[in-house]
Image: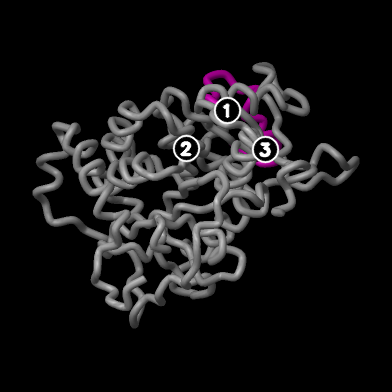
Amino acid sequence: MSDNEDQVPSFMRRVIGAIAAVVLAFALAQAALAQEPQHPVIRREGVKPKVPPGRDPGGIAIAMIATGVDYTHPEIRDRLARDGEGDILGLDLIDGDNRPFAPSSDPRNDAGAIDTILARRILSTYRHARLVPIRVDLNDKVMLARALAFAAATPARIVAVPFWGDDKETWEFFQQAADQISDQLLVVPAGDADAVAQGKAQYPGALNLKGALIVAAVNETMQRGTLAKPGAPRIDALVLGRGGSMFGGILPQATDSAEAVALAAGFAACIQHGATSMTAAETRERMLARAVKAEGPRNTPVLDPLCLYGGTRY
């Protein structure tokens, strides 16, 4: 790998065309692209650390679109998807490089620390997975579409999107990008538990993206009676903590919809374990078929993301 941090890695050069092709398909995005983007994220002092050297670990690739991760973390650095030259298959759309970094412990950047935890949840749920981290400004609608376009150009066929908002306009180009993609299983959150319980739209879940899997944590959903309320939003599956179906009494729980996304994304990779090829629709169908029980008047499937045969990385 080159020591020149400004050098564009070979993988990024190969996918630039793919990213441009998808983004340019959005007619409305042309005007937005001409505007000066605003990035109300916390800027970090100093230079981001270099990605630790390494080789591609192999295994099923999972992309995570979020605020960045600490790729120097010992649970992440050896699980980064890479190209043949050892360059990371990741992207920072805010800074325009392949170092989507967020410190794992920084009081000024709680979101980055949380997303590092979520990345660790993905990788610990399925230990054969490799991570494709993508850093975005959560309020930049064009950037969200670009992130999905980049994920589609990587080997990742599972894309975790562990955040949400109540502004539909922020997600309009993301929705257009999702409509262009059929090979990736998008795992997205139901949203804020209180808002969902009150029937308020939370995005991207409320977009009802075709082929997406909309998940929520069992505890936050059941405690608020969301599934029993008229007009409750679409929730495809509820998620326990790993091994939650194996214990009586106090069950391990996913904290919220964001952690439910991470656990479900890892479980999706577990479902694909040993398969030479499996479409997004087949993965989704097999996940729901593995439900440990059903809850609510809609018989919403409850998933336990325990991966017995893929839980240990050989």
Give the CA distance from mark 1 to mark 2.
Answer: 10 Å
Residue on which disc 2 sits: 157
**Direction right: furthest residue:** 248
Q: Position of residue 87 (x, y in %)?
A: 39, 63
Residue range highlighted in magenta:
216-236
Question: Does residue 270 appear to the left or right of 258 in the view shown?
Answer: right
Q: Secondary structure at mark 1?
A: helix
Which of the marked residues, 3 or 1, is nearer the chain's N terminus?
3
Identify residue type, mark 3: Val
User: Exactly how many numbered labels are in the figure?
Assistant: 3
Q: Which residue is mark 3?
A: 239
State the separation of the CA atoms marked 3 and 1. 16 Å
Q: Quadrant of residue 119?
A: bottom right
User: Element under label 3?
Assistant: strand
Asked whether residue 233 is in view, the answer is no
Nearer to me, 133 or 166 = 133
Q: Residues within 10 Å of mark 1 (few under 14, many from 20)?
A: many
The residue under label 1 is: 283
The answer to whether 301 is drawn above or below residue 131 in the figure is above
Q: Earlier in the sequence, mark 1 or mark 2?
A: 2
Which sits earlier in the primary sequence, circle 2 or circle 3? 2
Identify the residue at horizontal 63%, vertical 45% (top origin).
263
268 and 272: which one is in front? 272
Horizontal arrangement in the rendering, residue 9 relative to residue 296 (left or right): left
Decide whether residue 239 is among the magenta residues. Answer: no
**Left or right, residue 98 beside residue 116:** left
Q: Quadrant of the N terminus?
A: bottom left
- Whether residue 231 appears in magenta in the rendering, the answer is yes
Instruction: Please name whichever residue, 134 or 233, is drawn nearer the observer in this view of the structure.
Output: 134
Residue, far bottom? 46
Tell me where residue 39 appears, x and y as whole percent: 26, 60
